[in-house]
Amino acid sequence: MPVVNLSLQVLPLVPEEKAYRIIDKVIKYIRSTGVNFMVGPMETTMEGELDDLLDIVKEAQNICEKEGANRVISIIKLDYRSSGVTMEEKIKNYIDK
């Protein structure tokens, strides 16, 4: 299967003071998986096999629930191309050199 990009925005419905603590745990989990990822101000973009990334999305939901969110809204964007697509090729012209 080709490499895809998946962006994930997790919105745990908890009091604001708890939200960033939960989001930090989700990002820590993403880091632990070893996938290539980039944290942005509104979402985290990951690069890898589609099934692996969807498993990460599922675990992100579980983390939010374990941390006290009884409802979680997740917004997912997926960039798939049969030959694969990387984050680097999409942003290389915009990175300071």
Image (cartoon, rainbow, N blue to C red):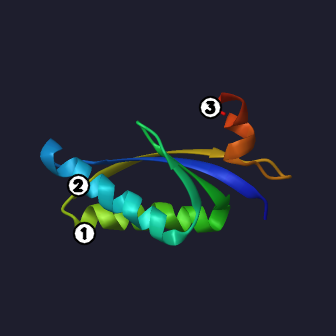
CA–CA distance in space, label 3 to label 2: 30 Å
Q: How many marks?
A: 3
- Residue 76 vs 21, above or below: the answer is above
Query: Is the residue marked by circle 1 packed among few (<14), some (14-19), or many (20+) residues within 10 Å?
Result: few
Location of residue 94 by image quarter: top right
Give the mark nearest the N terminus, 2 or 1: 2
Name the kind of residue labelled 3 in the image. Asp
Q: Identify the residue shown where x is 13% and y is 46%.
A: 17
Instruction: Give percent across and percent down for residue 64.
Output: 29, 61
Residue placed under numbered mark 1 in the picture: 66
Mark yes or no: residue 15 visible.
no
- Residue 40 vs 36, above or below: the answer is above
Secondary structure under tag 2 reads: helix
Name the kind of residue labelled 1 in the image. Lys
Residue placed under numbered mark 2 in the picture: 21
Answer left or right for 76 relative to 93: left
CA–CA distance in space, label 2 to label 1: 12 Å
Residue placed under numbered mark 3 in the picture: 96
Between 26 and 89, the residue placed more toward the observer is 89
Q: Identify the residue shown where x is 46% and y is 40%.
A: 40
Q: Mark 3 near mark 2, Cβ–Cβ under 8 Å?
A: no
Name the kind of residue labelled 2 in the image. Arg
The nearer-to-camera label among 3 and 2 is 3
Answer left or right for 56 relative to 94: left
For the C terminus, give its image quadrant: top right
